[in-house]
Amino acid sequence: MNQRGWCGYSDWRMPTRLELQSIVNYSQEIPAVEIQFFPYAQNSYYWTADIDIDDLDYAWMINFVYGNIQGNLTSIPRVVRLVRSSG
């Protein structure tokens, strides 16, 4: 996305676990995000930029169905939600 200048910007990155978790609404499920703010959110697991320090083949992901967090092998395809770098 950065090489393509997606939406006119080249500072996109994957969010940290805490950043992605901050948009989860734990008072609702399926999806566990506010669809009025994130209308294209998929009921799926989203990768974060955080690697599991106990196993470098794993990274953390957030489930947008129920809001749970878990690690999984990075070789498994999952959805990503990019954010822009601040500053």
Image: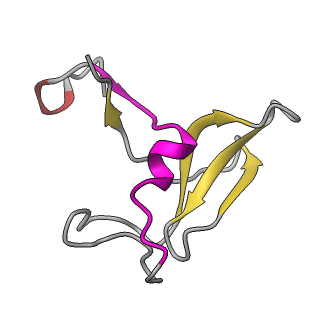
Left or right, 62 with respect to 35, comes to right
Q: Is 14 in the magenta? A: yes
Nearer to me, 11 or 33: 33
Query: Which contiguous range is marked in magenta?
Result: 11-26
Q: Is residue 9 above or below residue 55?
A: above
> Which residue is at the far left?
8
**Residue 27, image quadrant:** bottom left
> Which residue is at the far right?
54
Nearer to me, 6 or 66: 66
Left or right, 38 with respect to 29, comes to left
Question: Residue placed at 30% from the left, 71% from the top?
Answer: 34
* Residue 32 drawn at (x, y percent): 44, 74
Q: Is residue 7 above or below residue 61?
A: above
Nearer to me, 28 or 12: 28
Q: Is residue 48 above or below residue 28?
A: above
Q: Is 56 in the magenta? A: no
Quarter of the image with the N terminus is top left
Question: Residue placed at 50% from the left, 54% from the top?
Answer: 21
Question: Residue placed at 33% from the left, 37% from the top?
Answer: 83
* Residue 39 drawn at (x, y percent): 23, 68
**Residue 74, image quadrant:** top right
